[in-house]
Image (spheres, coloured by chain):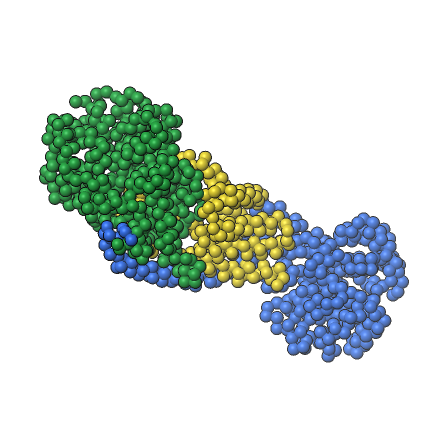
Chain colours: A yellow, B green, C blue
Amino acid sequence: MNEMQFLTWVRGPGLDIAVGIFLLGVLWRLIEIYLLGRKQDVAPGRHREGASGLHTVFRRSVPPPGMVKRSPVSYIGGYIFHIGLALIVFFFMPHILFFKSVLGISWPGLPSQFIDLVTVVTMAAMVVVLFDRINKPVKRYLSTFQDWFTWTLTFLPLLTGWLTVQHLLLPYTTMLALHILSVELLLIFLPFTKLFHAFTVFGSRWYIGKINGHRGVPV
Amino acid sequence: MSASLQKGINALKEVIDAPVASYFSSCVHCGLCAEACLFYVETGDPKYTPIHKLEPLRRVYEQEYTLLGRLAKMVGLSKPVTDDELESWKELVYDSCTMCGRCSMVCPVGNDIVYMVRKLREGMAVSGHAPDGIKGATKRTVEIGGPMGLKWPAVANVIKKAEAATGEAINVDKPGADYLVLLSSMEIVNYPEYLEALVKIFRKAGLTFTLASDAFEATNAGIQIGASDIAKVIVSRIVNSAEKLGVKYVLSPECGHAYMAIRWEGPNLIGRPYKFEVVHVLELLDDLRKKGVLKVKDKFKDPLILHDPCQIVRRGGVLDAPEPLIQSVAENYIPVVDKQKWNWCCGGGGGASAIHTEEAEALRAKAFGIKKRQIEQAGVGTMVTFCANCRIVIEEAFDHYGMNTQLLGLTELLAEHLED
Amino acid sequence: MQGPLIDTLVRQGVSRRSFMKYCATLASLMALPPAAGRAMAQAMAAARRPSVIWLPFQECTGCTESITRSHSPSLEGMIFDMVSLDYQETLMAAAGHQAEEALEKAIEDNKGQFLLIIDGSVATGLDGAYSCIAGRTNLDLLKHVAPHAAAIVAVGSCAAFGGIPKAKPNPTGAVAVSDIIKDKPIVNVPGCPPIPVVMTGVLAHFLTFGSLPELDRLGRPKAFYGETIHDRCYRRPFYDQGKFAKTFDDEGARKGWCLFELGCKGPVTYNACATVKWNAGTSWPVEGGHGCLGCSEPDFWDGGGFYKALSMPADPLKMAATAAVVGAAAGVAASFANRAKKGGAKAAHETVTLADLEK
């Protein structure tokens, strides 16, 4: 297989398969999780402003008082790499073109040089967060194979994408193909690993907000 | 007897629901919950990370309710939960968790960890892995009437004293009273002044209350050990009695988990809303304060801090009443940094205070370090709280550390300073 | 027309000065040191015409057109005239048996010395019967001639990589020259067609140094195929600024913005079009307003559509609907099983009594 055939495969059948597994997995897991249902709370509720599922979905994006000090790397590193990922995935021109070709909608992008900078910063943040996982006793204690694996899955698209744009290491064609391949791996594993929090985080926050909001506690 | 692993697993299968599934699917192992847990913060031991305490529940969830987990179990990749494992988790689920719910407040993905601990305890209890101390309290509550094994004569004695002190007759089993007043065993034994305070306050407010000889105990060890069926038996006593007497309100005492049991869990345990309302004593007091019924003659002078009991404030939703009340009676109230719904637990909630093994007591004392620092940093000699269990735990810790801090109950403090 | 090259050039009106200049340019194009230009000029001026045998296989004659005609009467074209082209079907006067005799004679006279140029892919299906010259399959001919050549230049994408004949479904079993011949130095000069100066550059190098220029992994001269079209494209700044033509006649297209979105394959195409240009430096596809087709890359025909941007998936939602239905079905099935299990657990529930707290 030469590099052009490789690229052709990853953006053809490879992407088909990856997107297919991704969609299949996401729907399957979402239904499996949320159709388990829950008992209705029959205790009369206490109404309070700001205590609801929806409020918590948003409020949990803000660090609780004093927590940034307790775990600065988790919060600062976490913010940087989440926001960075979002900017790169959704505001890099070639990516927007991708979405446009698939979904038919597009939106303005950010300058390539800026995305470049964001990518470097995001990768740095991810490396720092990884070191924190190795260094911090609690994180190390909780970590399983999945934690290292999903970190790699998330990091590879960033790295290969950056190398592609920078024309480093391998010829552009091969690098672009590797980039797309790494994204495909990410798509395939996302529904079946902790990366699925990208979807369930909204449900989880909504539940905790709803359950505690019923007692009038804005959590 | 009849506890078994199979019953335990079955109980877990019953209680796992969509929120639990969503929570476990969302956890990214960030470990931030540890930073909110007093047992981790004070010991630095990562095994006290709250989400880790739920490991058996997570495994049962994955093995029973996810296709991949079932598959993994079938091919032997995921080992079934064993009796030995649950036994070793006992310390994590009971000794080192007070169900204070602080971890649930900080989880960035919104996992309600305490919600899941409550569920895990259902499985721990019927597989025979609950600590003896809580088992004993549960047994005494069911068989005798209260976790301390108190019977009605002890209450009658307290009533007699209160009547003597206040010069007023106290109703017992009186139909049609506004309030049915509940007590906790600790109040009956250690803080009988509570009842006297109530008499004064009700008189001021022009309200009537009664006690019930068949339902005086508000605490509910069933929800602490994690046996909903038993909890239901205990809460039903109150519901039956209150509905028989036809009271409008049931007044929950200054006891954290009693409030949780009667106000929030109760209707769900019996499967229907009550025919009366449950009011926490602080809610009533604050209401009276707002109406101008409670007027203080003088104020408490010494600087003091407030300890917000988890089950009443953070988990019970009585958020706004405590602070205005303490401000109305104390001249030098110093708010602590982590107050109200962010307060740190005393270390003995969720049944932990009933566990009297050497390790559990040592751990409890260590975990109190954070409260100790709060007191020291505020530089006060007085702490006020409104939970009988917190009071016992804190007094024990004061003894342990040789602190001569004064500990007061909010209701009594108010009553003491009320206009006659 | 034997004799030193420079004499012929002078006769054709090319001054010594412009020849030197040409050599210097060629040397710099090939990234050789400045002194190489002089060496090249001396070597080429003194060179005798080497024998060249040009074999056409499965091809369209586009490469021949490109090299012999499009630059005429450019310097490259003249230099090309200077080799002794002993066999070239399209250009030679001889036909039939005479032509074949000329081929055999050229092989015989220049054994081990001649340069073998091939355009077109080699058909291997039906033992090569898809493409024959004088009753001989291309495959046969190649195997007959190649062993005697000094080196082989595979001109055009077909000879270099199989090209369009090899495009799916490849009915003739077309392969590249390098798939058949393994023991001769082969220079691939891909392109559909390739740039003439690349040909002459390779030739000049061969004349000057007696060796082939430095090649990349795909056997292409690094000097010409070292960078992508995208790297050297004059529209690159627009790409970096995110300015793209969306259609061939919009404002962006008129302003000369990047053609990436219109399917330009510049980023994955290694060739010199952007620097050397075509038709004596007049223009090149991107300058003409059309994206690069990637014609000098292997299998460019099967690259997923000329007008689809590179980052674009071929058709990622092909399986989406099926996947979604299967996923939803799996989820619903799992949920039924889960609910049944939970129902079973509820049914198995015996009211917990104090006795159940003890083992």
Compare residues B306 and A83 and report the one nearer the observer. B306
Relative to B408, B113 lies left or right: right
Relative to A21, C78 lies left or right: right
- Number of labels in the image equals 0
Relative to A71, B234 lies left or right: left
Q: Is residue B316 visible?
A: no
- In the rendered view, tell whether residue B278 sits above or below residue C188: above
Question: Residue extending furthest front?
Answer: B358
Compare residues A142 and C215 and report the one nearer the observer. A142
Please identify the quadrant where the N terminus of chain B is shown: bottom left
Residue C285: x %, y % from top left = 65, 56
Relative to A27, B229 lies left or right: left
Give the residue drawn at x 37%, y 45%. Answer: B92
Give the residue drawn at x 26%, y 24%. Answer: B329
Q: Is residue C129 visible?
A: yes
- In the rendered view, tell whether residue C75 sits above or below residue A114: below
Give the residue drawn at x 24%, y 56%. Answer: C350
Give the residue drawn at x 15%, y 29%. Answer: B162
Residue A203: x %, y % from top left = 37, 49
Residue B2: x %, y % from top left = 26, 55
Q: Which quarter of the picture shows residue C58?
A: bottom right
- In the rendered view, tell whether residue A163 sits above or below residue C105: above
Residue B158: x %, y % from top left = 16, 33
Compare residues A104 and B261 and report the one nearer the observer. B261
Please identify the quadrant where the C terminus of chain B is shown: top left
